[in-house]
């Protein structure tokens, strides 16, 4: 797909971070956008900002952990807005885990898997049948892009096992979906987006702002103390390391180019991460014991 004009793009996690940047980037290319998020205030603010840019923007409060909620989002896209040709399964959270893995609360695991993994599964289940039917009816090309992470898909960082586990699972599902669509000769194209090439400046470090009460973190739970990229930068500087970051707008442009180029792996490498991935692959192929990865 080279032309996004009048195409409807549905974006989960669309009120902040990469999702918000995707909405602006697509809107600038002439697309209509339907942004979904659990944060009503952020949704309203983002829609207003999009409208100021002359972008046709729609919104819906959507909890991706609920299949019913995502189905309602799909119904809005198809029954009210005429159908969608661009789906971005982008919603994600981080548990802010800290300390030994056996000390993590069940709620950390359950919340992260509910959002990061089941959110993707629910989005696939709600939209893929509609995309396949739409293809059969009008033969139009469509795309679903799933936001993963190199943290889990390519590398495992020892201080983020919950997040890594969810993103490893997401990658397995994304790749299987791609292979199924390829085998079927479908015009529904699947893309795996890996935000980068450096740590992306998003609100994921402060995911607790949207953490529901039924997954509340215990008052005495270990706290990473990291609420944003600046906190992480300060921590790394205390160890003599430098943190490079990437703005979400850059990730959005990478995503759109990945769609234009028909790429499955939508990723921008930095030299350090690429080296770490190559080292990990060699460790697997040569059966050598892995070396713990460090950020930076």
Image (cartoon, grey):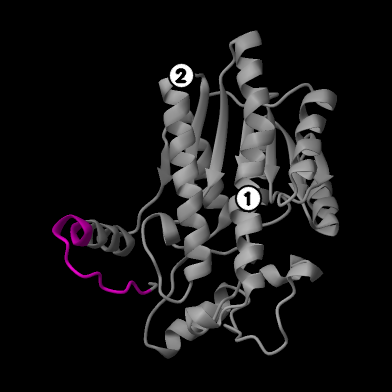
With 267 as the anchor, is 12 left or right in this view? right
Give the vertical position of 197 relative to 157 (above or below): above
| Magenta stretch secondary structure, dominant | loop
Instruction: Magenta stretch: give its range.
Output: 282-294
> Mark 1 Cα within 10 Å, few/some/many (few <14, many 20+)?
many
What residue is disc 2 on? 184
Secondary structure category for the residue under label 2: loop
Disc 1 + disc 2, Cβ < 8 Å: no
Percent across and percent down for residue 8 are 70, 29
In the image, taking residue 66 as reference, residue 184 lies left or right, namely left
Report the disc number at residue 69: none
Quadrant assignment, res 243: bottom left
Q: Taking 128 as reference, is 151 above or below it?
A: below
| Residue for point 65% across, 25% down | 129
Q: Position of residue 122 (x, y in %)?
A: 66, 42
Front residue of 21/144: it is: 144
Q: Quadrant of residue 176?
A: top left
Q: Residues within 10 Å of mark 2 (few under 14, many from 20)?
A: few
Q: Please tell me whether residue 113 belongs to the stretch shown in magenta.
A: no
Residue name at image x 74 percent, y 43 percent:
67
Quadrant position of residue 136? top right
Tag 1 residue: 118
For the point 79% across and 34% down, which residue is it? Answer: 56
């Amino acid at each position: 797909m080279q032309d996004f004009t009048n195409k409807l793009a549905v974006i989960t996690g669309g009120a902040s971070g990469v999702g918000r940047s995707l909405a602006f980037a697509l809107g600038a290319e002439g697309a209509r956008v339907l942004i979904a998020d659990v944060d009503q205030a952020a949704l309203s603010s983002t829609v207003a900002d999009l409208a100021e840019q002359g972008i046709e923007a729609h919104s819906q409060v959507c909890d991706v952990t609920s299949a019913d909620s995502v189905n309602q989002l799909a119904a809005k896209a198809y029954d009210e807005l005429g159908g969608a040709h661009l789906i971005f399964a982008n919603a994600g959270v981080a548990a802010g885990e800290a300390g030994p893995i056996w000390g993590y609360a069940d709620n950390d695991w359950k919340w992260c898997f509910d959002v990061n993994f089941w959110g993707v599964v629910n989005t696939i289940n709600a939209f893929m049948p509609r995309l396949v039917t739409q293809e059969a009816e009008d033969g139009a090309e469509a795309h679903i892009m799933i936001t993963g992470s190199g943290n889990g898909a390519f590398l495992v960082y020892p201080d983020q096992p919950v997040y890594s586990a969810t993103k490893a699972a997401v990658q397995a599902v994304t790749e299987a979906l791609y292979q199924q669509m390829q085998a079927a000769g479908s015009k529904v194209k699947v893309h795996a987006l890996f935000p980068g090439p450096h740590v992306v400046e998003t609100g994921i470090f402060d995911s607790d702002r949207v953490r529901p009460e039924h997954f509340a973190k215990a008052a005495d739970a270990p706290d990473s103390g990291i609420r944003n990229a600046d906190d992480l930068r300060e921590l790394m500087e205390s160890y003599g390391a430098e943190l490079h970051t990437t703005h979400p707008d850059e990730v959005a442009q990478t995503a759109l180019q990945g769609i234009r180029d028909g790429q499955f792996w939508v990723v921008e490498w930095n030299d350090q991460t690429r080296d770490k991935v190559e080292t990990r692959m060699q460790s697997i192929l040569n059966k050598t014991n892995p070396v713990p990865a460090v950020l930076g």
